[in-house]
Image: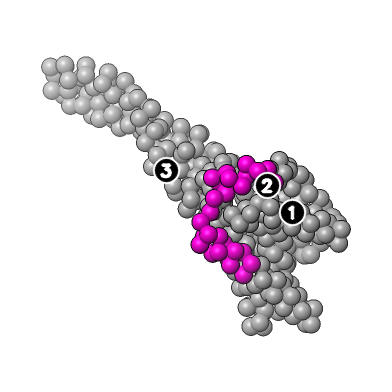
Amino acid sequence: MSPADQSGGLPPELLPPGYRIVTVAQPVPHPIGDGTQPARDDTSRGRAAGAGAVGFMATLLALAAKFKGALLLLLNLKWILIAGKLLLSSGSLILSIWLWSTIFGWPFATGFVLLIFVHEMGHVIALYVRGIKASVPIFIPFFGALVALREMPPNARIEAEIAIAGPLLGTAGAAVCHIIGLRGGGQIWYALASAGYFINLFNLLPVIPLDGGRVVAALSPKLWVVGLVGALAFALLRPGPGIAFIAVMIALSWQRIAAAFHPATATDPYYQVPSRERVVIAVAYFGLAALAAVGWHAAAVAAGSQ
Ligand SMILES: [Zn+2]
């Protein structure tokens, strides 16, 4: 597993290993030796000095060529990949803002997509800390964003940790908007806070692949049924493209959801979490959900009353 994959495309972590590999793989160009050797064999001093200068230049040129080769390789392989990933991520972010702005206007659309970004960064940081391979955040217009895991976390406890990091940072982001609103920032900050609390609360629905589902997997995968009912209720109350997309995502996780009731899952080492850690996860999960719900209500009331 390379650090590039671990970091989800964070450039500073990539340079040392990538650079080393490229330098070793690139042989020293032969012209260095070939160019300088004949000049030293020459008996004439003047010519030797001239040839020395030429040799020095050749060495410099060869070094430059070597470096350029290494640099180009570095650019071609790693950096084009990283640049592509970052372009995909930032491009999808900008596209999302633009499409949302057609409905809500630029200020709200920008704030809203940035709140989603803050949520995703919670996952990215947790994934980076745990060294789990994942994609860069990809923003899906009118849905939200996601970070796709390229490998399963080692156990349900770490999966829960990575999952809750998103709503944790995302709810904190919504709280910052809420505080700005309380300090007289204007109605838009309450509207952003309300939307921010809501998306994080929604993501805490206890069904995979939503964050809440990944958190409660450490408590009991059977809780996914509660999330399924919740998602279904939401789909009936607020039908739209967003919930349709989530329905597809849940359907894609169907095998794992169905396996929750398989007797083998109960003894699966993946789901064996010490009870002390289960308590911490439960307190964090229900506490965060309660906080987001209370915040959502308060911000929505404040946004409506102005
Ligand atoms: Zn999330």
Left or right of 192 on screen, residue 29? left
Dominant secondary structure of the residues highlighted in magenta in the image = helix
Which of the two discs, 1 and 2, labels the residue nearer the N terminus?
1
Q: Which element carries disc 2, helix, strand or loop?
A: loop
The answer to whether residue 63 is left or right of residue 246 is left
Quarter of the C terminus within the rendering: bottom right
Q: Position of residue 19 (x, y in %)?
A: 39, 38
As shown in the figure, which amino acid type bears the numbered disc 1? Val
Label 2 is placed on what type of residue? Answer: Ala
Dot 3: element? helix
Residue 246 in sight: yes
Q: Which residues, given as a range, are shown in magenta?
A: 261-287
In the image, residue 301 sits, relative to residue 256, either above or below, namely: below
Magenta highlight on residue 248: no
Residue at the disc numbered 3: 15
As rendered, which of 175 and 202 lies closer to the eye? 202
Q: At 72% from the left edge and 50% from the top edge, which residue is drawn?
A: 140
Residue that mark 1 sits on: 225
Q: Position of residue 55 (x, y in %)?
A: 25, 26
Residue type at tag 3: Leu
**Label ID, residue 260:** 2
Marks 1/2: CA–CA distance: 9 Å
Task: Give the CA separation, mark 2 to mark 3.
Answer: 42 Å
Q: Answer with the quarter of the image where residue 80 lies.
A: top right
